[in-house]
Image: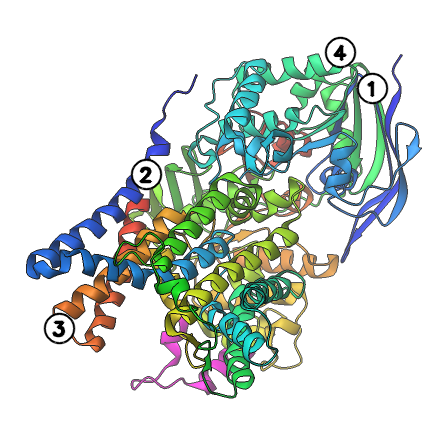
Amino acid sequence: MARELINMVHIEKEYPGVKALKDVSFQLLSGEVHALVGENGAGKSTLVKILVGEEKLDAGQIFVNGVETPITSIRESQKLGIIMIHQELNLMNHLTVAQNIFIGREHQYKRGLFLDDEELNRESKKIFDQLNLNIDPTVKVGDLTVAKQQMVEIAKALSYDPEVLIMDEPTASLTDSEIEDLFNVIRVLRKEGKGIIHISHRLDELQQISDRITVLRDGNYIDTRKTSEFTIDEIIKMMVGRSIYVEKPENNVLPGAPLSLEVKGLTCEKLVKDVSFNLQKGEILGFSGLVGAGRTETARAIFGADKLKSGQIFVHGKEVKITSPHAAIKQGIAYLSEDRKRYGLSLGMRVSINIALANMAHFINPIGFIKNHMINKNAKEKVESLNIKTPSINQLVRFLSGGNQQKVVLGKWLTRDSSILIFDEPTRGIDVGAKSEIYKLLNELAAQGKSIIMISSELPEILRLCNRVIVMCEGRVTGELKGDEITQEAVIRYATQR
Amino acid sequence: MKNVVDPTKKVDLQKFVVFGVAVLLFGFFAILRPAYASYSNIMTIVLSTCVNGLLAIGVTFVIITGGIDLSVGPLMTFTGIMSGTALTVWGLPIWLCILIGILSGIFIGMCSGLLVTKLKLPPFIATMAMMMVLKGLNLVISGVKPIYFTSVKGYQKIALGSAFGIPGFYNAILIFVAFAIVGHIILSKTLLGRYAYAIGSNTQAARLSGIRVDTWIIVVYATSGFFCSIAGLIMSSRLNSAQPQLGPGYELEAIAAAVIGGTSLAGGVGTIVGTLIGAFIMSELQNGLRTLAVSPEWQFVVIGMVLILSVAVDQLRRKNV
């Protein structure tokens, strides 16, 4: 008989400004693989982080084996046998594989005061044999490939002999045969009566391995059902929600508009594999995909922030070599990072200086003194045209709201007169009103003949602004959608295609 | 069962390079001045490595966790002054005075650790502040006068006697080697060392593995304080006194030794053996330049260049791998 291992009831969690979980309940039985699905930001990761004590819950209860158990630290959840394989690799590159697997539990393998690495190596070997893996436990983790590192993470989790195993997208970097090995291990655990929580975006994979599926959307609990009762299309519909107002943009790009950017076969060390696309003058091109699909990496490569392995970039029809952000800016390319506070702004400086900062050469006189009146004049223009809400151009950027900070960054690149603007999650963390203003601005800029790439994880805004969408998955372009083809279902399908 | 893999060799290669530099330097000076390679001069070099070597061992622990300890110089002096105060003011037996010196080193290390973990001060600031505080306390406690250990017969023998009766083989060297071995074993074979690497390599991952990161960082700073106190013991014994003005400047030499020995300021990388070779290279250089009658001013310039060179080579090597 299956018994209840975990029961999370009425869980609430709020981060500053965002309600991450609203009255979410989740139950895990022994001997089941329970899949947790939802879009980026639906609250899946937050829910399991609460379960392992990595995040504190604001309200709600957790029952472990029927007993109410507050879990406030990772050590506590480890003691209860609840183990999580993290989405990001959480390994220590400078330690060996075996040392990583048994980190925090060396006392079980000690001889007196001293650590026993030989024993750790032997124990690791046993786990790898069980996983049908060929990894040398004495190698430093930093010298392994990402896929192998992921397998080390999994081996580490299994070495705890968990009662409840949580996997947060464990298969993202694995090959098919490695996934099959992992699933075989999961099947064994299931037979032993363990409970497995599986978070994945690969819906086909969930159908293979899971018994039940719970869907979350925007921090809300939607439904839990047996996997056999769902079709993939139904799951997708529940994930994105049915009733989203979609305002189709007019196609204001002329059919014969010149190409302002053309990218051919772009490949980098990291997450960019043979990416090709083009961008027309006056177009807003959407880049969609899940977190880690390689969109930001592609943008960074075009902007010269990461080194290219191969590929060509043409700007206004001419091939250019972009080896640094400086070179990219010279070509009129601007990149507005998703983390504007870290990469886009000098928070402790004035609005006026921030707007001038990318083009200072323009604001100095021949002997090198800064022409403050020019800086102020330019700032006033931009504050007006972009409708930046600030008490004065001398306000420190730190005190502006997120939406207005984003506009300051935009003002900076417009001062530079960039013609190709790459926006990476331009509306992240800003409120609805400011969002619609940014949308309006993007449309205006496109109408003025700027070419825009918009990377966004929020499908509705892609649908609202873009006439053409490139969908990426794991560093590759998996689809290009135009006009009416752009639907949430289609985008998700391509974004989860291997 | 154990199949040898290339990646592990990389680290050894680097240590080999540093060792090679030490040997080359030695050969270089020995050819120019044969007296440089004499037994008594070699022992002089080793003796002059003792204090810096012990401080560098302490600082290596901290740097491996991704931190830095700028307080080791004045802390070394502080432990000597505490011992001396216990002896001359409180009139305690000498063994207890030495113990008080060691405990005060551990205590101050713990304080730095608490500043870093509980008050979340950046290690650079926390230990720089600690350095200033100690520099002042050293002067205040001593009344800006040296504290002499002359009342204790044979205090100077702790460092300058020779237990085996071999001339030139001072006890200081013996103590240095013994504690270097202790340091090596702690770092490579015990939980403390393992967690130091783990924290320096990826603090977040260490925390998620259930390691009490804050506690271990405090222990690491305390360990650094302990090694400072041993250095302080040797120093006060050699001088037969605690000199309150001494100390500032030593911390930078200790960090330099660790860095030349391959310890990465980014954390996660470093060994005691490497640090010792680094400390030896510095003494070797100072001694060699002196025998060549290079003025002290120029000695600084040369040592600075060596530091630049050793780290630059390391950076280039890493890029090419």
| x, y percent for residue A194 | 77, 19
Q: Residues within 10 Å of mark 2 (few under 14, many from 20)?
A: few
Q: Quadrant of residue B283?
A: bottom left
Could you tell me if residue B270 is visible in this image? no
- Separation of disc 3 and disc 2 at Cα? 35 Å
Pointer 4 residue: A191
Instruction: Name the amino acid type tagged 3.
Output: Ala
Residue A106 is a magenta residue: no
Position of A314 relative to B50 (above/below): above
Give the Cα distance between marks 2 and 1: 48 Å
Which chain is mark 4 on? A
A435 w.r.t. A271: above or below: below
Secondary element type, mark 1: loop
Q: Earlier in the sequence, mark 4 or mark 1?
A: 1
Marks 4 and 3 close (CB-CB < 8 Å): no
What's under tag 4, amino acid-wise?
A: Lys
- Which chain does the numbered disc 3 sit on? B
- Residue at x 25% of width, y 66% of height: B303
Vertical order, A435 against A32 (above or below): below
Which residue in the protein does label 1 denote? A30
Q: Amino acid at mark 2?
A: Asp
Is residue A321 shown to the viewer in this render? yes
Does the CB distance between marks 4 and 2 fall below 8 Å?
A: no
* Residue that carries the numbered disc 3 in the rendered image: B293
- Which numbered mark, 3 or 2, is in the foreground of this view? 3
Quadrant location, the C terminus of chain A: top right
Disc 1 crowd rating (10 Å Cα; few below 14, some 14-19, many 20+) is many
Q: Amino acid at mark 1?
A: Ser
Mark pair 4, 2: CA separation: 46 Å
Towards the viewer: B275 or B149: B149
Q: Secondary structure at mark 3?
A: loop
Q: Disc 1 vs disc 3: which is toward the camera? A: 3
